[in-house]
């Protein structure tokens, strides 16, 4: 039996866009367009200026495009674009390992594709490879054990997907790709000690840079282990997860596409709050739910989402508001929608909203609910009650977003960042990515006015 690291390496290095089923290619384009939307929105992130300053200091050059904001060095743009995708908490998530994947995979792929004048079909194949490898490396973890040890998925798993995407663009063979994985895994890091702080987002962009460095070093014949995942002494599965389930990482490889299990977020809020918002959206059109007439809102979640998001009845600022089930429920009920504007101080500091979130919204764990499920009960001052439920959050594989819906998200996020006449060009280019002659055409638009100068 081929060791898992080499099996995944040979798959990623040998992948051709013609080998990828049409449905998988379309799923990948949706993930790419969603990542671009999130990156443009990420310029509104609270910590974006800090990360921009740090990324700018890595090297004094501007050869690589920052999505929505000019250029930086290859390393700087990879790092900053990774942060931008995750900055305002609206990017994808692979729910089996609670891992955001596009922040790690898309930035290094775009940077190398731009540098090397790569055609769209090759970029698409690289994205498929990176997304699939990230998900499958995560599948090989016994996630309950992994999480029980305190590990946070993006920083641990993400470097492998970033290395796979870059290695595929650079034409690695299986041996070179396996060494890139060894170098990527040697940089795996990130724990839940960072939860509740922006450091969890740093895990993702740092993973993008780690994978880029791993691939570029492996390309220079740097010696590294080719069996990182299952090595007994210090391998990822042994050390991070007590042995893991490596057979799952390669099961039906090339036949079943795990990247199609990646979920998206229509609303800018934490992953596990999408079920709350889905349930609320089902209630939004009901007559008789006037915000001023609500006496109490009861939100029930499964245990893990409650532990992560049920403790923010009071919140400090934007990041905690993005994590707060109390605030999300309050502002959605008041405004009937949830956009980035609701996470600006003028909104979340509204004393009426703060009081409503703290005093009139109850969030509790419900043992009978599974992951992704939520129930809402709204009690009115006149005694009426309204009930809502989510079984599958909008954006999950069971309740997916269409390309049209993601394109609308992109338009909303791009409205203040790109020239109005170019927004539709990006949506069209991504939709027909296989026909793009040179990735630089796409990156020139995404760089905003500076990139078009």
Image (cartoon, rainbow, N blue to C red):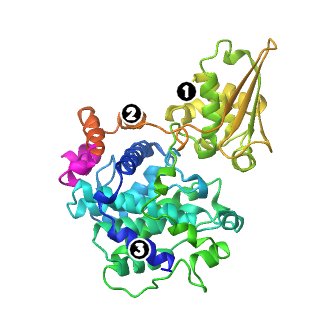
Asked whether residue 59 is in view, the answer is no
Q: Residues within 10 Å of mark 2 (few under 14, many from 20)?
A: few
Asked whether residue 26 is in view, the answer is yes
Relative horizontal placement of residue 62, taking residue 288 as reference (left or right): left
User: Is residue 244 shown above or below 200?
Assistant: below
Q: Main secondary structure of the magenta part?
A: helix
On the image, numbered disc 3 is attached to which residue? 9
Marked residue nearer the N-terminal end (1 or 3): 3
Residue at 47% x, 68% y is: 159
Foreground label between 2 and 3: 3
Foreground label between 2 and 1: 2
Relative horizontal placement of residue 410, taking residue 115 as reference (left or right): right
Q: CA distance from mark 1 to mark 3?
A: 44 Å
Residue 433 colored in magenta in the image:
yes
Mark sitting on residue 447: none
Q: Residues within 10 Å of mark 3 (few under 14, many from 20)?
A: many
User: Is residue 202 shown above or below 378?
Assistant: below
Relative horizontal placement of residue 245, taking residue 155 as reference (left or right): right
On the image, numbered disc 2 is attached to which residue? 404
Marked residue nearer the N-terminal end (2 or 3): 3
Splitting the image into 4 quarters, where does residue 289 fall?
top right
Q: Nearer the viewer, residue 124 or 71?
A: 124
Counting from the top left corner in percent of width and height, residue 135 is at: 51, 60
* Residue interval drawn in magenta: 432-453
Counting from the top left corner in percent of width and height, residue 179 is at: 41, 81
Counting from the top left corner in percent of width and height, residue 217 is at: 35, 79
On the image, numbered disc 1 is attached to which residue? 337
Callouts 2 and 3 close, C-beta under 8 Å: no
């Amino acid at each position: 039996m081929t060791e898992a690291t080499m099996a995944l390496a040979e798959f990623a290095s040998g992948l051709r866009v013609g080998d990828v089923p049409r449905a998988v290619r379309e799923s990948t384009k949706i993930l790419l367009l969603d990542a671009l939307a999130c990156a443009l929105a990420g310029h509104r992130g609270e910590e974006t200026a800090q990360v921009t300053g740090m990324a700018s200091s890595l090297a004094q050059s501007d050869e690589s495009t920052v999505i929505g904001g000019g250029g930086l060095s290859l390393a700087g743009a990879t790092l900053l674009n990774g942060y931008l995708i995750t900055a305002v908490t609206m990017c994808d998530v692979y729910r089996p390992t609670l891992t955001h994947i596009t922040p790690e995979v898309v930035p290094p792929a775009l940077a190398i594709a731009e540098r090397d004048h790569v055609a769209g079909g090759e970029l698409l194949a690289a994205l498929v490879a990176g997304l699939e490898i990230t998900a499958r490396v995560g599948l090989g973890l016994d996630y309950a054990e992994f999480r029980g040890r305190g590990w946070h998925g993006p920083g641990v798993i993400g470097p492998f997907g970033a290395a796979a995407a870059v290695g595929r663009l650079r034409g690695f063979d299986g041996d070179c790709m396996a060494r890139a994985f060894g170098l990527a895994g040697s940089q795996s890091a990130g724990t839940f000690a960072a939860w509740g702080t922006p450091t969890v987002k740093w895990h993702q962009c740092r993973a993008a840079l780690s994978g880029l460095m791993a691939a570029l070093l492996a390309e220079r014949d740097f010696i590294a282990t080719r069996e990182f995942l299952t090595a007994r002494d210090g391998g990822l599965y042994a050390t991070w997860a007590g042995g893991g389930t490596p057979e799952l990482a390669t099961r039906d490889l090339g036949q079943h596409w795990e990247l199609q299990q990646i979920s998206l977020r229509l609303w800018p809020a934490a992953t596990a709050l999408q079920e709350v918002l889905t349930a609320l959206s089902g209630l939004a059109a009901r007559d008789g739910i006037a915000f001023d007439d609500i006496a109490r809102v009861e939100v029930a979640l499964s245990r893990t989402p409650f532990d992560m998001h049920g403790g923010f009845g009071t919140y400090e600022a934007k990041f905690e508001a993005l994590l707060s089930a109390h605030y999300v429920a309050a502002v959605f009920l008041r405004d009937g929608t949830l956009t980035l504007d609701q996470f600006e101080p003028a909104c979340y500091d509204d004393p009426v909203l703060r009081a409503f979130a703290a005093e009139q919204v109850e969030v509790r764990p419900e043992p009978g609910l599974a992951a992704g499920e939520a129930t809402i009960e709204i009690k009115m001052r006149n005694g009426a009650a309204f009930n809502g439920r989510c079984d599958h959050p909008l954006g999950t594989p069971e309740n997916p977003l269409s390309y049209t819906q993601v394109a609308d998200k992109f338009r909303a996020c791009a409205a203040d960042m790109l020239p109005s006449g170019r927004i539709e060009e990006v949506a069209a280019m991504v939709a027909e990515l296989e026909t793009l002659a040179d990735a630089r055409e796409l990156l020139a638009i995404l760089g905003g006015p500076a990139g078009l100068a």
